[in-house]
Amino acid sequence: MPTFNSVLEAMLNAWELPKLAAFHKVMWRHLGVYNDDDLWDVTAPLAGISGDDTWECYGGWLIAQGRTFYEAVMRDPKVATTRVPPLDDIFEGESVIFVAQRVCGKKTGDKWSLYDLFGDDLSGKPLPGGDFPVSW
C-alpha cells in the first residue's frame, strides 16, 4: 500500500487545484463504498473492522486493488471474501481517499484545504473572495 500511495501522490502533485478538488469529490462521494450495506455486511466481520473511519479505510484499500476487483466487489460484495487484506493495509487505505487533500496542503503550505478553496461541493470553482492562485 505505501508504494501505491506514493505513486498516486506523485501523479497528483502535477495537477492544478481544481482538478484535485474534482478527484477528491469522486473519492469521497461517488465511489459507492460508503453506503453499501451489503458490502459492509460481508467485509466488517471478515476483516474484523467497524466504525465510521473504516468506510474510508477499506474503500481506499479497495480502490488500490484496481478497477477490475473494485467493480467486481461493487457488483457482488461476496467477491470481497476472495481477498482479505491485513488490518494495516486497510488502515493505510485511508491515505488513498485523502491523497488530493494532502497534495493541496503541500501546494498551499498547509494554508488551505480543498474545502477552504472550493466549498463543500468541491465544484472546482474558487469561492468568492478567495485570494489564491488556482494553478498552484
Image (spheres, rainbow, N blue to C red):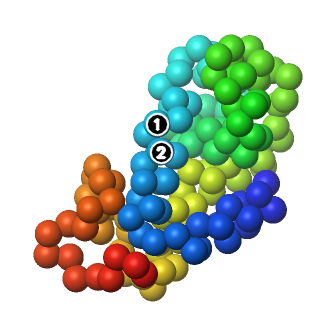
Residue found 33% across the figure and 54% down from its top: 122
Is residue 8 in view? yes
Residue found 63% across the figure and 22% down from its top: 74
Q: Amino acid at mark 1?
A: His
* Residue 107, horizontal then vertical, whole percent: 48, 80
Asked if residue 26 is positioned above or below residue 117 in the image, the reply reads above
Quadrant of the image occupied by residue 118? bottom left
Element type at mark 2: helix
Q: For the residue carrying disc 1, how many other residues have a C-alpha within 10 Å: few (<14), some (14-19), or many (20+)?
A: few
Quadrant location, the C terminus: bottom left
Q: For the residue carrying disc 2, how many other residues have a C-alpha within 10 Å: few (<14), some (14-19), or many (20+)?
A: some
Nearest the camera: 5 or 71? 71
Residue found 42% across the figure and 69% down from its top: 17
Q: Which mark is residue 59?
A: none
Residues marked 2 and 1 touching at CB (< 8 Å)? yes
Quadrant location, the N terminus: bottom right
Q: Residue furthest left?
A: 129
* Residue 54, horizontal then vertical, whole percent: 59, 39
Q: How far apart, in angstroms, are the residues tagged by discs 2 and 1? A: 5 Å
Dot 1 corresponds to which residue?
30
Nearest the camera: 116 or 46? 116
Dot 2 corresponds to which residue?
26
Left or right: where 43 falls relative to 101: right
Asked if residue 122 is positioned above or below residue 126 in the image, the reply reads above
